[in-house]
Image (cartoon, coloured by chain):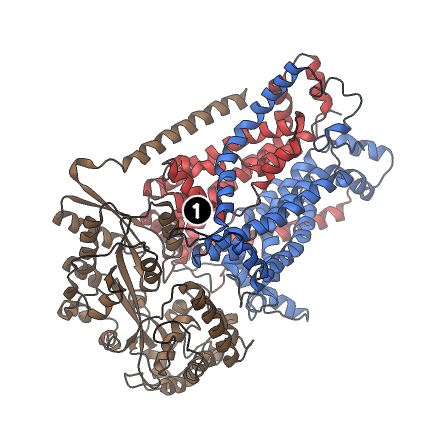
Amino acid sequence: MRDTRSLPARIALYCAVLAGAAIMLFPFLWTVITSITPEGSLADGPTLIVDDPTLGAYRTLLDAMPIWRILVNSLAIAVASTVLQLITGSMAAYGFARLHFPLKNVVFGFYLATLMVPLQVLVVPLFIEMKTFNLQDTYFALLAPTIASAFGVFLLRQAVTAVPLELDEAATIDGAGHLRIFTTIVLPLIRPALATVAVFAFMGSWNSFLWPLVVIRSPEFMTLPLGLSTLQGQFTTQWDVVMAGSVVSIVPIAIVYLLAQRHIIAGVAHTGIK
Amino acid sequence: MRIIKTAVAAAALTALLAACGQGSATKEAAAPDGKTTVRYMNFSANDGHEKDLTAIVNAFQTANPDITVQVETVPYANYFTKLQTAVAGGTAADAFELNYENFVTYAKNGSLAELKEVDAAAYKKSLYDAFTTDGKQYGVPESFSNVVLFYNKDLFKKAGVAEPNADWTWKDEQAAAEKLTNKGAKVWGDYQPVSYNEFYKVLAQTGGEFLNADRTEATFNSPQGVEAAKFLVGKVGKTMPTEADGAGTPDFDSKLFKSGKLAMWHTGIWMFSGMADAPFNWDVAVEPGNTQKASAMFVNGLVVNAASKNAEAAQKWITYLAASDKTTETRLATSWELPPVADEAKLAPYLQQPKPANRKAVFTALEETVLPPVIERQQEMQDIVTQELTSAAAGRKPVEKALADAQTKVNGLLKK
Amino acid sequence: MNGTMDRTEDPTVSRPVESTANRTTTTRRPRNWKTLGWVLFFLLPSAIPLFVFTLVPMVSSLWVSLHKWNLISPMEWVGFRNYTNLLTDETTRRVFLHTLIYVAGYLPIVYAGGLVLALALNQKLKGRAFLRATYFLPVVTSWVVVALVWKWLLNPTNGLVNQLLGAVGLPEPGWWTDPQWALPAVILSSAWKDLGFVMVILLAGLQSIPNDFYEAAKVDGSNAWQRFWRITLPLLSPSTFFVVVISLINGFQVFDQVYVMTAGGPSGSSQVVVGQIYDLTFRYGRAGEASALSWILFALILVITVIQIRGQRRWVHYA
């Protein structure tokens, strides 16, 4: 279907997609422009050409906080949380999609239920719980709520379910057990879904604000959103610095997405499975 | 298998993180060689005064070698979220900062330790008394700031309007604002937010009372209240930009003034440093009154956590931070709000600084001030009043109806 | 390909030929124990953290919901009074109504838009990777920035959107300054921001549709439109199901964008359930009522999700 499109249709499609992309890119461009405009102000609206661009805001950002330490913290937590969610999520997905056990739907229901109570009311009880274990103000506390996510389990379960059962059966005949089927058949075939989950897990941890705010008090554990929030004063805000901070926070996720995208594209479509 | 390798790496990483986590959790329990550590949480040092606070901490530690102060600075916007959770979890700092509006809630709920043997004479009396509840001292004033009328001298000159002085009333302000407003050039005559903080003040300027004497009933829906609200609301769209013009977005007013497109601006003295490099002449005056003068004053206080194990050291620290000469010097030198000290001679350096010329107005305004009316359910009350006034300002409700509705709702809060 | 069997949800309808795959329904005990071991092996790594770090706090919040609590003084038992108060409170009705309007407006736009995008960017286009990343940028940009930009775009007097509307002679709404239009403004900007999210998930779904199906259909002489309806949509249904369920769960908990764009205003006209929960907990010192409100919300989301899971076997096609 993809090769038979007429030339005008392709051009029209291309134009539409490009126009859409411009709209999508606009706020990000604005962010970048504001960050290099001296005393940049978002309220005035963007001017596409900056008279005398400056990296002053980025320098201020460097001075205002131990930005490298903060970036390393955020990165470490986000990577750990992503890897853990991929492991816990894919295993649970396999369990729900391939194993049969009593009350499976109820158990899955409990998983989904964890998504249905807003974080805003969970923060306080969770904080008190952490305090009981004397784990507040630690890296572990930052990581704890994102070791597993029902979102990831659900998305991966949908993907595992789409893997043809015949492949498992063939492997079973060859003497493979669950662990081998999981690692050698299922995991490679759900790579697009894994990559998708990875992007969202990374993003969730990277942007997380309320929980780190509450649980962290030592500056050495500070994460990026916490650091950036200190740029907003009680009475005034230096928008150019805030925007510089936003650029610093957006770029890493964009890179993660670009890396993950290769896997999202290279799916199972080309294999002659069926 | 790559997956397995990643898994192992992840497990190792997690173990490592957990390990350093443990390290830090045990850290605070250890009291190094007889020293007392006082944890202090604050918002007012955020975004600009972190180094000034550190300087005060260092001076205090030199004077008190057996006490270490551990500072935690949280932006104002998130401060109370964090403070409440910490109090709920029993991990709140030994000493922390509270603005006057929130002080009452914390004092009434038994979260604060009573301060004993404080040198009351060191503080301006009205400020000191603000932190007394039921005859007990639960805090000391840390700093204060007030609101004055900023004005752009160049715009006044260009429009041929006489500059504001201490004798101005609302009428003078309104007349000047109308002359100064030039919508074609996007120049506005006046800016005063339509909000709770402005309303209780203009109400006082008209001689009205927000609450009855024993704070059991709201009384702002009075002829004075209506006059005050109409004064505020009447500016919107006429001499003052509307929401649609951008009013209410972050930093809108400061940018507007700094770009020379705003003639008069009701705002706090905390804006002095930000406007120091404005490319035009500006000065300040005491805010005009109606039947009387009343300037808004905002006070931050310092308190000791009722659950603190180091209450004594914590009190030592907060009284130092509030009234020591080191603090007074630092605050004045860095334009970091005003120190609450009784001895006005200590404030002299403040008046010697250049811009704005009429710094005296800051102290003149203090002669007739009004503190925000405070009830236990403060934030709800503020939201209700601001919301109703905004409705009136947008023309969705007559002013009278908005005030009546606000009063009914605030009375509901007082009853529960 | 029309095997619409729903093995996950209903093990009793398994295919008769699944002799080898059907490992569990045997009655011999050792087998069961072994299966149980596998179940634990695969589920515990996620079940334990979810239990400890989410379910336990959830149960605590249920406990909190039966108390009067301002976080800073001890809790006071009030039984179900928080619930009865909330259920008779006019504000509760209003915030739920606003949330429903949000979901009803947001979901169709974001799904339709995301699907079109996913289909377009699944084509062989030059710079496709770059384009996909572009469409994903809003998803990763923080709401603080996005809200400021959209408030500017939707500025009633000189915003770009109203200028365009004015140019073609359409009415120019007051957007976030007008109680009638504040919610639509939030819906519009949310849909814009989340298009990339839906796109990414649907792209992953599209990628797992074997090309052979399309080849076979082409041999049968079907046109592109028919292939879309008969192959793409049905085989995309697991992804669609996921998007709809998750978008509803998240949509009912909409908060960030409202908080930064309108803060629930003007005059509470865009206040949503979680916004109210946040205000009650952290601004008004009414954590008990906030917890109760979140459990009422939980009940609503649960019912809607269960209905969807029950209903999925009518339209979700697992390959």
Label 1 marks a residue whose chain is: A
Image point (41%, 34%), residue name: A140
Rendered brown, the chain in question is: B
Rendered blue, the chain in question is: C
* Left-right relation of B156 to C263: left
* Left-right relation of B356 to C99: left
Query: Relative to A193, does residue B409 appear above or below in the rendering?
Result: below
Q: Is residue B277 visible?
A: no
Residue A51: percent from left, percent from top:
43, 60
Looking at the rendered structure, the secondary structure element under dot 1 is helix
Q: Residue furthest right?
A: C221
Q: Colour of chain A?
A: red
Image point (64%, 14%), residue name: C30
Residue A5: percent from left, percent from top:
77, 42
Q: On the image, numbered disc 1 is attached to which residue?
A: A124
Residue A44: percent from left, percent from top:
47, 65
Total marks in image: 1
Q: Residue furthest top?
A: A175
* Left-right relation of B347 to C286: left
Residue A188 image-quadrant placement: top right
Amino acid under disc 1: Val
Q: Nearer the viewer, residue B409 or C45?
A: B409
Q: Nearer the viewer, residue A176 or C160?
A: A176
Image point (49%, 58%), residue name: C260
Residue B192: percent from left, percent from top:
40, 74
Q: Nearer the viewer, residue B411 or A166?
A: B411
Query: Relative to B202, does residue B82 appear above or below in the rendering?
Result: above
